[in-house]
Image (spheres, rainbow, N blue to C red):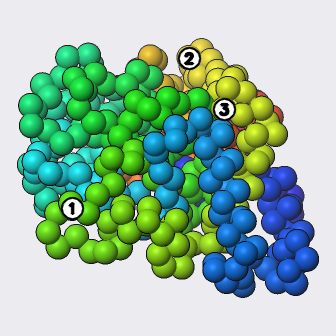
Amino acid sequence: MSRVYNFSAGPAVLPEEVLKEAAAEMLDYQGTGMSVMEMSHRSKAYQRIIDEAEADLRELMRIPDNYKVLFLQGGAHQQFAMVPMNLMKNKVADYIITGQWAKKAWKEAQLYGKANAIASSEDGTFSYIPDCTDLPISGDADYVYICENNTIYGTKFHNLPDTKGKLLVSDVSSCFLSEPVDVSRYGIIYGGVQKNIGPAGVVIVIIREDLITEDTLPGTPTMLKYKTHADNGSMYNTPPAYGIYICGKVFKWLKRQGGLEAMKEYNEKKAAILYDFLDRSKLFKGTVRKEDRSLMNVPFVTGDKDLDAKFVKEAEAAGFVNLKGHRSVGGMRASIYNAMPIEGVEKLVAFMEEFEKNN
């Protein structure tokens, strides 16, 4: 069977080149006579893999020297707890609620201190980003938290909120490496890799060094202290070794594509093809306010649940898979991450045009 166009929100499409490279090295990684899956994480060969992955990520994102890169486990969900456990010195934090994951993070933070929801777009089913130019930021807040791209609802912060000098913490799981970013504007920027970078099981945390201290909330497990992992080069325990190896390959692939500037241009081109169609379609419509649209996740509906289901079924038969919207919102969603080729989007739009004619 030939490969399908996979519009899954995560785990998601990976660059074919990377998969082929990994396949070629599956039984014998660079003359070691074994797979990376079988390799000791304490070996010289593996140390090179993780060091190179970090160096390439630093280059791609132009990460300043006073930030540490940590390859961790537990997904973004574990960061919902790790952030307050490590940063909530005053036991106060401000959260901007723009979707399900920001809401989950905010609820988790309430276990550790006072978590204030200072802005929300829940009144509009998270179909927009609230105005963040003059937020009621708490004077004693330890940080301000956002989820920068909302996978389920297809919204994106195109401008970072004015945190009035407070530390910004951002979950970038679904827009990671899709465009250039100024890391110095964040205290912590983190994301699960299974959407845009690699296989599920790795979360990357980029954290400013002055935030890495022993001074965590009482009872914080050793495994949940950033300092533990920073002091041990992400090797305090066995890391998700194979996942990090694939991430490293994706970083090299991104460099070959021309880096994040080139990726942004490519992603804008791809997204425009789909959004332009949705804006002129009589049957399909996008669900997000235009100025807040994500380049990565594009939700849309026909307005008729049965027709939505028919579309998803017929699309799958035609080789366009995982277009069903998140169970909490229904409808459809096309996730068009870095590795989705432009022809995948063009062919999807051609299929949608055909479906519209017939229905």
Q: From the viewer's perspective, is residue 21 above or below residue 61?
A: below
On the image, numbered disc 3 is attached to which residue?
A: 260
Callout 3, which amino acid? Leu
Between 244 and 320, the residue placed more toward the observer is 244
Which secondary structure lies at badge 3? helix
In the image: residue 53, left or right of residue 131: right
Counting from the top left corner in percent of width and height, residue 35 is at 79, 79
Callout 1, which amino acid? Thr
Tell me whether the residue at label 1 lies in contact with that at label 2, contact meaning CB atoms closer than 8 angstroms: no
In the image: residue 278, left or right of residue 203: right
Tell me whether the residue at label 2 lies in contact with that at label 3, contact meaning CB atoms closer than 8 angstroms: no
Q: Quadrant of residue 348?
A: top right
Which secondary structure lies at badge 2? helix
Mark with earlier residue (1, 3)? 1
Q: From the viewer's perspective, is residue 31 above or below residue 269?
A: below
Query: Which callout, 2 or 3, points to the residue nearer the camera?
Result: 3
Between 25 and 227, the residue placed more toward the observer is 227
Q: Is residue 266 visible?
A: no
In the image: residue 176, left or right of residue 273: left
Q: Residue 216 got which mark? A: 1
Image point (41%, 57%), residue name: 76
Mark with earlier residue (2, 3)? 3
Q: CA distance from mark 2 to mark 3?
A: 27 Å
On the image, numbered disc 2 is attached to which residue?
A: 279
